[in-house]
Amino acid sequence: MDLASLSLLFAYFGTLGFLALFGWHRYYLTFLYFRHRDRPILGVPTWDTLPEIPFVTVQLPIYNEKFVVSRLLAAVTRLDYPRDRLEIQVLDDSTDETQALARREVENYQKAGVPICYLHRKDREGYKAGALQAGLEVAKGKYIAVFDADFLPNSDFLRRLIPYFYAQEPVGMVQARWGHLNQDY
């Protein structure tokens, strides 16, 4: 066997060994997950033991979402969180009839006592990030929750999420698990 064939064989088995270790590591992580999935996370207070209930701003960036905006607003306005500690921002960059629909729904929720506001930008500079930045400039919340137009949070979402920011270790961001309504398609 010549040197080129030997080095090619060595590279092949080296790569194969690396992939085998990588695969084994994934199985090991899966094993650890199932072994410890019911164990509580230490140092995270419960909702009832929080030192304070922080002000939270929920941002909803939308762009031409006429088919889902009503469903989104209905889900977000059902959040079980103190109304005096909550602000909901509808950040609308739409150029179609979503504008009128979203504005009308926001006005109806405002009349019902929901702390919600409608912000519309005409220029879409920065796209979704630009809309979020424009909302941050007027946001009152200590914490910001961003929900895309197809995200429907459970009513207890904030009550379950906020305590993680008061864990013993400093936390700067929490990402929650989410799913899709049309996951079978």
Image: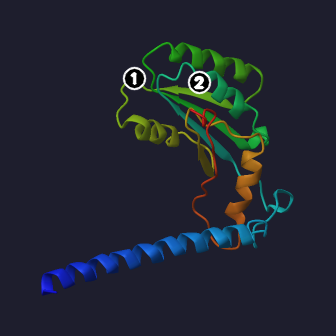
Residue where numbered disc 1 is placed: 122
The residue lying at 63 percent from left, 43 percent from top is 179
| Nearer to the camera, 178 or 138 | 178
Q: Amino acid at mark 1?
A: Lys
Marks 2 and 1, how far apart in space?
Answer: 21 Å
The residue lying at 73 percent from left, 72 percent from top is 35
Which image quarter is the N terminus in?
bottom left
Query: Secondary structure under badge 2?
Result: loop
Residue 16, image x and y in percent? 37, 75
| Nearer to the camera, 56 or 11 | 11
Q: In the shown orientation, is residue 93 left or right of residue 143?
A: left
Q: Amino acid at mark 2?
A: Val
| Nearer to the camera, 121 or 28 | 28
* Corner quadrant of residue 71: top right
Q: Residues within 10 Å of mark 1 (few under 14, many from 20)?
A: few
> Mark 2 and 1 residues: CB-CB less than 8 Å, in contact?
no
Decide: is 59 above or below 113.
below
Residue 73, image x and y in percent? 66, 27
Decide: is 82 above or below 39.
above
Decide: is 167 above or below 21.
above
* Corner quadrant of residue 121: top left
* Corner quadrant of residue 15: bottom left
Q: Residues within 10 Å of mark 2 (few under 14, many from 20)?
A: some
Residue where numbered disc 2 is placed: 68
Which image quarter is the C terminus in?
top right
